[in-house]
Amino acid sequence: MGFTYEALPMRVSFGAGRCLEVAAELDHLGLARVLVLCTPRQGETVRRIVDGLGDRSVGVFPGAVMHVPAEVADQASRVAADLRADGCVAVGGGSTVGLGKAIALRHGLPVVAVPTTYAGSEMTPVWGLTQDGIKRTGRDSVVLPRSVVYDPELTISLSARLSVTSGFNAFAHAAEGLYAPDASPILDLMAEEGARSVFAALRPILADPTDLDARSEAMRGAWLCGAVLGATTMSLHHKLCHVLGGTFGLPHADTHTVVLPHALAFTLPAAPRAAAALGRALSVPPDEVPLTLQIVSTGLGAPGSLAELGMPADGITEVVRQVMASPYASPRPVVAEELTGLLLRALAGDRPA
Ligand code: NAD
């Protein structure tokens, strides 16, 4: 066995109530004038954080949008420049962290992330920008947040549906990290523990969304899964979700949740070590991993089919075309006919095969 492992620099502050200590992180990084980013819906959460920042906060930009439209990134960048901000604090899910990354890409402003979902963007040097309906992505170390403050209390307000689907989004990072071409023993440990942790937390969270132990378990798992995402190359599952989201505007976490059982049913037979690790994470035999994910996610109220998310049946040909035109690395060679079958099952919500 041979591998190369490069650790990404990451500073993490974790714990209930830590969102009130963001000021200490800014002082540690030497940031004195930050622009706070959020979505319009998260104003209340942000107000508490801004109060704790005192005069280190020079403004709030509450306009983060899914997939970072270029015009929103332009607007937020102008606000940051006008306010002479020396950094950004991104409070929210992948969309808000993505906006912070877009500003960092243009102006080099350091990002402090305060995640409120399990998407994991805060652990990656991957940025995305959408212009004229096309999402471009790239890797640049300048966008990797300098510090991440994980406060499980901030996830208590997540809806039941987003708690589950965002958890499965995190699980997907771990799953594909286990069979990535740049996998390594240390990332395998993080992936298996991350997947186990997120999965174990979901039922208790649904039973009691205010259960702080379960929220902490999910967030700790999401951190590990995000770190795996940031350090490895993703495969067919992420490619499919990228194409489906970009082409039909399907919601990010929902799409991951529906596609994952089908993508893993296709890939895991060619990745037995990954299947074994995921089997241990779910406490099921390796060949039952895909069906278990589907049964549990739909049982917890997540959508079960791409049709439910608004995917048109005649869109399959275009998805297959795009995936085959620029495939990601996959342990199992991807064949157009098999891909069509996979998508038909995902569209209808059939069992993974
Ligand atoms: P999101 O950030 O779009 O949030 C979804 C909705 O949930 C928003 O309306 C938001 O206001 C709300 N929300 C978020 N946290 C909440 C909370 N705690 N309580 C109540 N409401 C809350 O969703 P997401 O799934 O976190 O992120 C998806 C985006 O992130 C996609 O654009 C995806 O491509 C990107 N992403 C990027 C990376 C990367 O490495 N670059 C990784 C993962 C995801």
Image (cartoon, grey):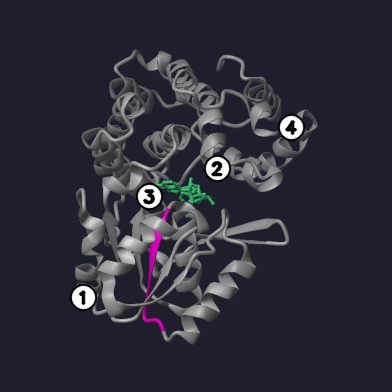
Quadrant of image for the N terminus: top left
Q: In which quarter of the image is residue 281?
A: top left
| Residue range highlighted in magenta | 85-92
Residue 316 is tagged as: 4
Instruction: Give the amino acid type for the residue marked by disc 1 in the picture.
Output: Asp
Q: Is residue 63 above or below residue 202?
A: below
- Can you tell me whether the CB of the residue at mark 3 lies under 8 Å from the nearest atom of ligand 1? yes
Whether ligand 1 has any atom under 8 Å from the Cβ at mark 2 is answered as yes
Secondary element under disc 4, as helix, strand or loop, is helix
Lower position in the chain sequence, tag 2 or tag 1: 1
Separation (CA) of disc 2 from disc 3: 15 Å
The answer to which of marks 4 and 3 sits earlier in the sequence is 3
Tell me the residue that label 2 is attached to: 252
Q: How far apart are marks 2 and 1 (CA)?
A: 34 Å
Q: Name the residue under label 1.
A: 27
Between discs 2 and 3, the one toward the N terminus: 3
Q: Does the magenta stretch include residue 87?
A: yes
Q: Which of marks 4 and 2 is nearer the N terminus?
A: 2
Q: Nearer the viewer, mark 4 or mark 3?
A: 3
Residue corresponding to mark 3? 116
**In the rendered structure, which amino acid carries the disc numbered 4?**
Ile
Residue 264 image offset from top left, x and y in percent: 49, 26
